């Protein structure tokens, strides 16, 4: 396993190269993804990674596709709009690490319940079950962020992002 050019992301070299993130909660998968264990360079510690399927994540696909700049990195504060049940959010959580935070906004109560349950084991995720079109309803929970990532499939998605900026 070697570092990717984007901080917080790694590549598992082998028969099939895989995009992976360092698991913030070793021993647990979020959505049934494969986990890999590697020894640290001094062979003292075992590090667990989670395979990130680019076919289940637009952000994962962008990284595999060669996106030029990645503002989500260790220590980042991220506002994630359209978090769904938290599949990609969990990898963003791994990327930003314990020093970063992911404010995950999801409108659907069903997906929001899954997101909330997943975030109980990841201290750097703040789940917000609310409409991203109404940022005034959750703005008091969020400080300044470094990145806004939008995964909302709405005709007015650009307006939604600007209202959250």
Image: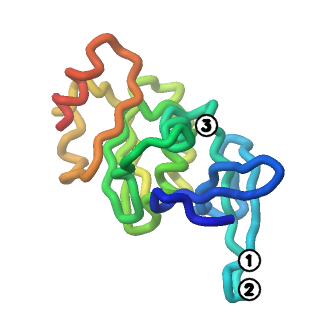
SS at badge 3: loop
Within 10 angstroms of label 2, few (less than 14), some, or many (20 or more) residues? few
Q: Quadrant of residue 129?
A: top left
Give x and y (percent) for residue 144: 19, 52
Q: Earlier in the sequence, mark 3 or mark 2?
A: 2
Q: In the displayed structure, does residue 9 sit left or right of residue 132? A: right
The quadrant of the picture occupied by the N terminus is bottom right
Q: Quadrant of residue 105?
A: top left
Q: Earlier in the sequence, mark 3 or mark 1?
A: 1
Above or below, 39 relative to 126: below
Report how far apart the C-alphas of labels 3 and 2 lie in the structure.
30 Å
The quadrant of the picture occupied by the C terminus is top left
Dot 3 and dot 2 residues touching (CB under 8 Å): no
Q: In the displayed structure, does residue 120 sit left or right of residue 48? A: left
Evaluate whether residue 36 shows in this view: yes
Residue on which the image places disc 1: 39
Q: Quadrant of residue 39?
A: bottom right
């Amino acid at each position: 396993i070697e570092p990717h050019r984007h901080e917080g992301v790694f590549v598992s070299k082998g028969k099939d190269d895989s995009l992976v993130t360092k698991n913030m909660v070793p021993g647990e998968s979020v959505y049934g993804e494969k986990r890999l264990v590697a020894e640290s360079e001094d062979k003292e510690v075992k590090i667990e990674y989670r395979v990130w399927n680019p076919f289940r994540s637009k952000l994962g696909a962008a990284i595999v596709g060669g996106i030029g700049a990645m503002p989500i990195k260790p220590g980042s504060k991220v506002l994630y709009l359209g978090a769904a049940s938290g599949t990609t959010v969990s990898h963003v959580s791994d990327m930003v690490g314990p020093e970063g935070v992911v404010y995950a906004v999801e409108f659907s109560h069903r997906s929001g319940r899954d997101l909330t349950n997943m975030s109980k084991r990841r201290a750097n995720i703040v789940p917000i079950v609310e409409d991203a079109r109404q940022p005034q309803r959750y703005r008091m929970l969020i400080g300044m962020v470094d990145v806004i990532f939008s995964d909302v499939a709405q005709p007015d998605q650009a307006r939604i992002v600007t209202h959250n900026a």
